Amino acid sequence: MRDFKKDGPRRDFDRGPREMHKAVCADCGKECDVPFKPADGRPVFCRDCFAKKKRY
Ligand SMILES: [Zn+2]
């Protein structure tokens, strides 16, 4: 079961719309929006590729 309270306060909810950052998927090369700031040297994946990776 999920218990969000254990994760500590979640601020995403009262911040309104989530900030999206433009990034290029490291796998398929598509441009995508990610809800976090892409860090240098860190691969960013679009939703499709991210889902694919989770399967392994
Ligand atoms: Zn991709």
Image (cartoon, rainbow, N blue to C red):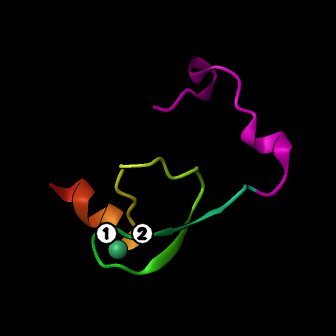
**Residue behind label 2 places its C-beta within 8 angstroms of ligand 1:** yes
Q: How many labels does the image show?
A: 2
- Compared to 53, does 28 lie above or below? below
The magenta segment: 1-17
Q: Which of 42 and 13 is in front in this view?
A: 42
Left or right for 13, reference 55: right
Residue where numbered disc 2 is placed: 46
Amino acid type of the residue tagged 2 in the rendering:
Cys
Q: Where is residue 18 in the image (x, y as percent from the top left)?
A: 73, 55
- Compared to 32, does 54 lie above or below? above
State yes or no: discs 1 and 2 in contact (Cβ < 8 Å): yes
Residue where numbered disc 1 is placed: 49
Q: How crowded is mark 1: few (under 14 residues within 10 Å), some or many (20 or more)?
A: some
Q: Which of 2 and 43 is in front in this view?
A: 43
**Residue behind label 1 places its C-beta within 8 angstroms of ligand 1:** yes
Q: Is residue 44 magenta?
A: no
Left or right for 13, reference 1: right
**Residue at image point 58% right, 50% down:** 36
Q: Where is residue 34 in the image (x, y as percent from the top left)?
A: 55, 61
**Residue at image point 51% right, 74% down:** 32
